[in-house]
Image: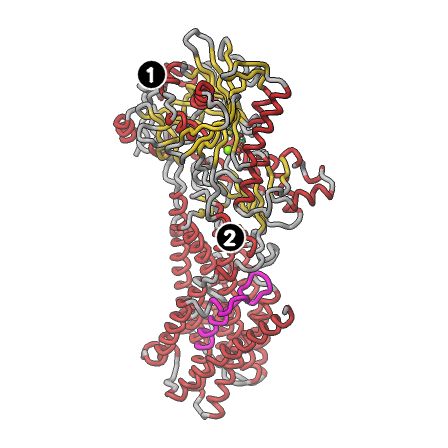
Amino acid sequence: MEAVEAPGGELGAWSRDGDEVARAFEVEPERGLSGEEAQWRLEKYGPNQLREIKGRSIWSILVDQVDDLVIIFLIVTAVLSMVLGFWVEGVAVAIVVLINGVLGLAMDLRARRSMQALRELEEESSTVVREGRPVRVGAHELVPGDVVLLEEGDVINVDMRLVEASRLQVDEAALTGESLPVEKGGGALEAETPLAERSNMLFKGTTLTRGTGRGVVVATGMATELGGISALVEGEEEGDTPLEHRLNKLASRLIWVTLGLSALVVPAGVLAGRTLEEVGMTAIALAVATVPEGLPVVATLTLARGMLRMADRNALMRRLASVETLGATTLICTDKTGTLTENRMVVRSLALPSGEVMVEGDGEGARLVGGGGSGGEVEVREALEVGVLCTNASIGHDGQAMGDPMEVALLRLAREEGVEVEGVLARMPEVREEAFDSEVKMMATYHRLEDGRVRVAVKGAPEEVLAVSTRWRGEAGEGAFDEAERERWRRENEAMARRGLRVLALASREVADAEVAPYEELTFVGLVGFYDPPREEVRDAIGECAQAGVRVVMITGDQAATARSIAAQIGLVASEDAEVIGGKELRAPEELSEEERERVRAASIFARVSPEQKLNIIALHQEAGEVVAMTGDGVNDSPALARADIGVAMGQRGTQAARETADLVLRDDRFNTIVYGIEEGRVIFTNIRRFVVFLLSINWASIVAIVVASLVGAPIPVTALQILYLNVVTDVFPALALVATGGASELMRRPPRSPKESILTGHHWGAIGVYGVVIAAAVLGSLAIALQVMGYEVGRAVTVSFLTLGFGKAFHALNMRDLAARGGDSDARVSPVMRNGWVWAAIGLCAGLLAMTVYVPWLRGILETVNPGAVGWGLAVGMGVLPLVAIQVGQGVVLWWRGRGVG
Ligand code: ADP
Ligand code: MG
């Protein structure tokens, strides 16, 4: 739909007053639009989205398939075959190229479609005011005139004129290239003000790095400034993943091997007096045999499948390539609130000047039950009033809460205790807010009183509020807040924190006007202790991590005592007196002594950590070779998320800015989802290994068989067309089946693989070499028996050896247990591959496809097979099973040997 210019589009919103702009858009900043009006405008102006991101054309994907060296090699082979007069072979290879292209295309499209589906799960939402109530709506539903509530970390998805702002700072780099955040707010500007200086406007594509505010939408979709800059809008290209890259390199190396071997085989054949035709056939067969056609495609499919499985369990991978790294994670740095705990805060206790008041009940019906003190009602009222004033949260008539869980908990308790939230706000309307800032750790709101004076309500971290309080007031009177009093409250705070409570301090003050700075000469009101229950399932997940060789470290903005208590409850540390390192001690690695570094590396709990200090923790651990996963939710966490090997953002609690830099987004915010992700990452990596080893070893088997046969002057055991049939038709199924192998529990019982390890280690190369030779020996043996013992003519004997190769390859899938010392599945009693039903089904399918080569007349014609008869079949199947038996025995011996070495 063509973007329609909004009513105030020509207005120059930055040069008008906020109220004027709101009027032009027919909206009241306090009430917002009505639902109907918003719906009507949505139809009129269209959804808030930029032009459809252009998908890649099928053609360009097809060209992509062709530019890979393997395909070029096959095309050259096809052309050469035809030039040399091997028409059928040439055409067959050409068909393979085509099938390969189409298959690659189909899988590529599938993978892309899954990625698209994943991206749609990430659709962002905004909080808007509709009919006087804040509601969340999807970003594409925003319309001109909507009133948007802004919060630190929001990525702005429309253009708007600010009507309210507190400490707003915006990163506009995406739009203006300015890398430093700019301050926003204030009144009307000159009409000529250039875009980059329109400080009362927020633009689509920029990020709120600090503060809160309210804005009226002036443009959506293509009508925004960003929409005007079309270059920024074009879709980003998905490049090859490093994995595909490495696999492609591997495949091209194999091609050089073939060329080398052909250089050996051709002259040897000529010397042995073979006809040129025979030698040519051998060379073509060899060329075809070497190329592992399915490799890169199966790899992409494996990664995509893994991502879909993870998405089903709320773990969204934002980059295909990170799946590999995820499995190698050795250290998880996790925050506490909401990840290890439920983020379902309830007020448990109020510490007031005349004593502590306990609160009982869950979130919905919490109520006071009295306590040690006189239970002074006036003090409770005063405290709850500050809590109700100093808030951005709200509870609707239906009980639906929006906003920070701590603030919601305060509102709930206030309601339960009969504090009229609406009444309090009507009596003392808010005139200004000093937004919460994780550096300052406090927030304040200003409220106009009836006599014209202004009341400041403050809440924040206890040590900060105590430091700036100079008076106290309670039922027993009021007085100066001296050092002794301050110390008493510090101890009170400490005692509450040790019970696992998250503590906030409340304070207030009366001033002449709203311009006075907030955090000075406050009157202390009391402390509030919130309880946030640890998530039940976390304890098990931490145990699982310990088994899997993954360390878990808690990093929180909360205070030490609270952190320690929760850590002990979830089994992260053994005792309540575990060491806690405070944020202040976390300096850059080069400023720490070796001893201090060791201390930091050994610690499991970090408290009062600011987002910048997270970088130091990551750096120290990465220096020691750890692969670090780090969680984050705030906009300030972005650098840490980018720096970590796996940045983990919270889908519910987190800011959009954090999500955009993360590698992994937890849709449910749960710690267990990270652990699940690591598990799945390991499964995926191991399965990639499985099919790579599988495809390479069976290719190697064909090469060995052909080269040896041609060097000793025997008939070539498989023809070029037969090899093609095996490579393109039958091999694909076991390879794909291997991808679906489970066995996560075994993988989580051993330490992670070394991150430096490539897909194949020396161990794997060795195994490929041995496997190939064993299978080739069976094929050559089968050929020899057919010729010498059974006395078959050459065509029939070759059919037998071809079938032996076919069966040998199919059965070989069952050998794909990873015996690597680290990260494999040698611990499993029964190999996970044997338990994978798909592999058995694939073998059955292969058997059917092999039978077809003999019994379907036209296939028999093309592949030049001869019915081998019952005995011939027996020979082929028997010799085909032999490598499986031999390799299984060999693996058993290796495991026994290793077990003996260890035990
Ligand atoms: P965390 O949420 O991990 O504790 P933050 O940086 O968000 O880390 O908060 C740091 C401290 O600031 C909190 O422990 C609390 O004392 C205080 N705080 C957090 N949110 C608010 C808020 N909305 N209003 C006032 N103080 C807050
Ligand atoms: Mg927080």
Three-letter amino acid code at the position of disc 1? Arg
The residues tagged by marks 2 and 1 sit, at their Cα atoms, a distance apart of 53 Å
Frontmost residue, 795 versus 427: 427
Of badges 2 and 1, the one in the foreground is 2
The disc at residue 678 is 2
Q: Nearer the viewer, residue 280 or 185?
A: 185
Depth check: 593 or 233 in front?
Answer: 593
Q: Quadrant of residue 742?
A: bottom left
Quarter of the image that includes the N terminus: top left
Q: Please give the residue where the numbered disc 1 appears in the rendered image.
A: 23
Whether tag 2 and tag 1 are in contact, CB under 8 A, the answer is no
Q: Amino acid at mark 2?
A: Ile
Viewer-proximal residue among 828 and 368: 368
Rendering coords of residue 844 (x, y %): 38, 73
Question: Around disc 1, counting alpha carbons within 10 Å, would you say few (fewer than 14), some (14 to 19), or many (20 or more)?
Answer: some
Is residue 205 at least partly visible in the picture?
no
Q: Secondary structure at mark 1?
A: helix
Q: Is residue 318 shown left or right of residue 3?
A: right
Q: Quadrant of the C terminus?
A: bottom right
User: Residue 334 at x, y = what percent?
Assistant: 54, 43
Residue at 39 percent of width and 49 percent of height: 57
Q: Which residues are magenta?
A: 807-832
Provide residue 24's location: percent of width, then percent of height: 33, 17
Q: How many marks?
A: 2
- Where's residue 788, x and y in %? 49, 92
**Residue at the spot x=33%, y=80% of the render?**
855
SS at mark 2 in the image: helix
Tell me, yes or no, whether the highlighted magenta stretch contains residue 150.
no
